[in-house]
Amino acid sequence: METEPKYTDEEWGLLVGLPQSVLIAASQAEHDGSRRTREEWTAGMTTIADGRGSSSPLVKKVADEVVARQGDITHGDEPPIIEFPDRDAGLADVISRARGAHELLAAKAEPADAEAYRYWVVTVADQVVGAAKTGGVLGLGGEQVTPAERTFRDDLASALEV
């Protein structure tokens, strides 16, 4: 089943770009050190790559394209780490694009594909925010998911109506 012909180039770009944008936003929701950021990116790119095994043709196709563009973490490729120049504006933009993706999916996708895509994108955020503790000393203490990370994840889920 072909998925992208029903989408314009701009719409397809939104669907393909959103998972990595969510990874960036979830990673930047809380400022972490470089080791923690690398752990978050690895978790996010692994979850994106795992989408290639989805039963949803849409998720599978989007995941294939993201992995083709960014490299396959499951084969040892290092994920590129990207940061927003303005963290707050970047987070707000990702939530806005998630709303746009939700509307697009509601209008054009098969219901099962739309649900699978939305769930997968929120799973990317869940994996990123839960990948590394923030704070603490020498691995003791800290928070697995900070309030800022939880807020981003919840805002994303609300935008996608998951």
Image (cartoon, rainbow, N blue to C red):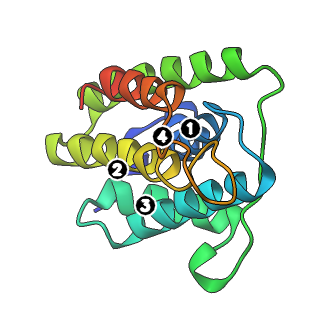
> What is the three-letter code of the residue carrying label 1?
Ala
Residue bearing mark 2:
120
Q: Position of residue 24 (x, y in %)?
A: 64, 41
| Quadrant hosting residue 107 | top left
Q: Do the residues under discs 4 and 1 have CB atoms within 8 angstroms?
A: no
Residue 10 lies, in percent from the top left, at 57, 31
x 64%, y 42%: residue = 135
The answer for how far apart the CA atoms under marks 4 and 2 are is: 12 Å
Outermost residue toward the bottom in this view: 75
- For the point 25% across and 25% down, the residue is 161
Quarter of the image where the C terminus is located = top left
As helix, strand or loop, the secondary structure at mark 2 comes to: helix
Q: Return the mark for residue 61.
A: 3
- Label whose residue precedes the other's in the sequence (3 or 2): 3
Q: Nearer the viewer, mark 1 or mark 3?
A: 1
Q: CA distance from mark 2 to mark 1?
A: 14 Å
Identify the disc placed on residue 42. none
Counting other residues with Cα less than 10 Å from the Cα at mark 1, is it few (<14), some (14-19), or many (20 or more)? many
Answer yes or no: do the residues labelled 4 and 2 have beta carbons within 8 Å?
no
- The alpha-carbon separation of the residues under discs 4 and 1 comes to 17 Å
Distance in Å between CA atoms under marks 1 and 3: 23 Å
Residue type for callout 2: Trp
Vertical placement of 156 versus 1: above or below? above
Q: Find numbered disc 1 in the image and state the secondary structure of the residue it sits on.
A: helix
How dense is the environment of label 3, judged by Cα within 10 Å: few (below 14), some, or many (20 and up)? some
Q: Mark 2 near mark 1, Cβ–Cβ under 8 Å?
A: no
| Residue at the far left in the pictured view | 111
| Circle 2 or circle 1, nearest the eye | 1
Query: Mark 4 = which residue?
Result: 15
Q: CA distance from mark 3 to mark 2?
A: 13 Å
Q: Earlier in the sequence, mark 4 or mark 3?
A: 4
Percent across and percent down for residue 97 are: 51, 23
